[in-house]
Every structure is written in structure tokens, then in C-alpha cells.
Amino acid sequence: MAEVKRKSYLSETSWGKPIIGFGDPRARLVIIGLAPAAHGANRTGRIFTGDRSGDWLYRALHKVGFANQPTATSAKDGLKLKDVYITCTVKCAPPDNKPTPEETELCSRFLIEELKIFENAPVILVLGKIAYDQIWKLLGKDWHQGGKKPKFSHGGKVSFNGKTVLMSYHPSQQNTFTGRLTEKMFDEIFTEAKSQITYGIVTKK
């Protein structure tokens, strides 16, 4: 994937390797996306950096004080996160941005290790249904007590044993260009996440 470049990036050396998470090592909010974008994280080497999904994400994080700036253009742009750690379900850029079940399963061991590091984080925000399905599977019965999995929905929430999983549509162009996900809808998710980790309450819509 790293060998295929857009004209505007021809002079750059692409990262082209698996992506690790990024953020505050003491984070109380863990955000889980889908996979590195071919011309985003796969190019820059940092999750949600250098693509339009990242434009939406970091703008929203900055609005509620989770990020020191609203933009993410490169791994050396000075971006710092407070109380947030961001990672993804699949660690390498998949063809056509569509991870296969095999890829998701192969990368699950790395996501498990990240979840162990942040096992005391009270809030997980999943961006998209694939991330939600994987988190439900990986956290296991000790978390959700073997109950029936609630349907994925934007603004949905599952809480058990002191941990909450918030759900949001992924800020992909497919969702943002069509209006399925609006800036207001996305901002509300982060306002709620902030309330959850600060006060342990859910913001009413």
C-alpha cells in the first residue's frame, strides 16, 4: 500500500508499516477506530493523521480539551493528547479500507495488549460497528456478563462493572460526506465521553 502514492505525496517517504496507538499513557478514554487509512496513518505513521477522518476526530477532541490543537498533519506536528489514547482494530492499511475477518482476528492480539495497558480506563469509544463487534468479543464475559449484545447505533452505550463503551459512526468520508454523521452528532459523543470520565454521568441530549 505504501508504494501507491497520490501525486501530492510523491516526495514523501511513506511509513508503510503497522500502526501503534497514540496518546496519553494515563488515559481514561480509549478510542478505537478501524484501520490505518492508505494515505493517512499508513503515510504519516500516526493514527488518524493526515486524512479527513483525522480532521474530524482531532477537531472534536480539541473542542472539549482532549487535544492541544485541532489538526493532525504529521507525526511531528506537535499534537498532544490529554486523558485520551487512540488506537485501531486492524494495524495495517487494508485493501480498499475494508479489513477482512482474518485480518481483524490476526490483529486482535495486539489490541488485547493495548486494552490490558488501559484496563482501568472507564470509557472506551468505538468508531464504527467493526470496532464495536471486536471490543465486545475481546472484553469477554467478565465484562458484559454473557448478556445479549446491544445493537450498534450512533450514540449507543453499554455499561457493565464500572466500564462504559460508547458508540459512534466512524468519521469516514462515506459517513461525513453523505450527512450520516454530522459535526454536531460527533461533537455530542465527545461531550458525553468527557462527562463520563469527569463526573461518571451521561450527558442528556
Image (cartoon, rainbow, N blue to C red):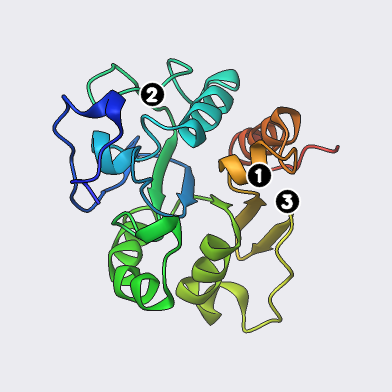
Q: Of all residues shown, which one is farthest toward the right?
A: 205
Marks 2 and 1: which is nearer the front? 1
Look at the picture and state if 171 lies above or below 76: below
Q: Is mark 2 on a helix, strand or loop?
A: loop
Q: Give the Cα distance between marks 3 and 2.
A: 24 Å
Residue receiving disc 2:
72
Q: Looking at this view, is 71 or 201 the one in front?
A: 71
In this rendering, would 25 be left or right of 155?
Answer: left
Residue 197 visible somewhere in the drawing? yes
Q: Looking at this view, is 29 or 134 the one in front?
A: 134
Question: Residue at 68% across / 62% down in the picture?
Answer: 158
Question: Residue at 68% across / 81% down in the picture?
Answer: 147
Question: Residue at 50% across / 36% down in the picture?
Answer: 53
Q: Is mark 3 on a helix, strand or loop?
A: loop
Q: Which amino acid does label 3 sit on?
A: His
Q: Residues within 10 Å of mark 1 (few under 14, many from 20)?
A: some
Q: Quadrant of residue 49 in the image?
A: top left
Q: What element carries label 1?
A: helix
Percent coordinates x, y for residue 60 in the rendering: 58, 26
Q: Give the Cα distance between marks 1 and 3.
A: 12 Å
Residue receiving disc 1:
175
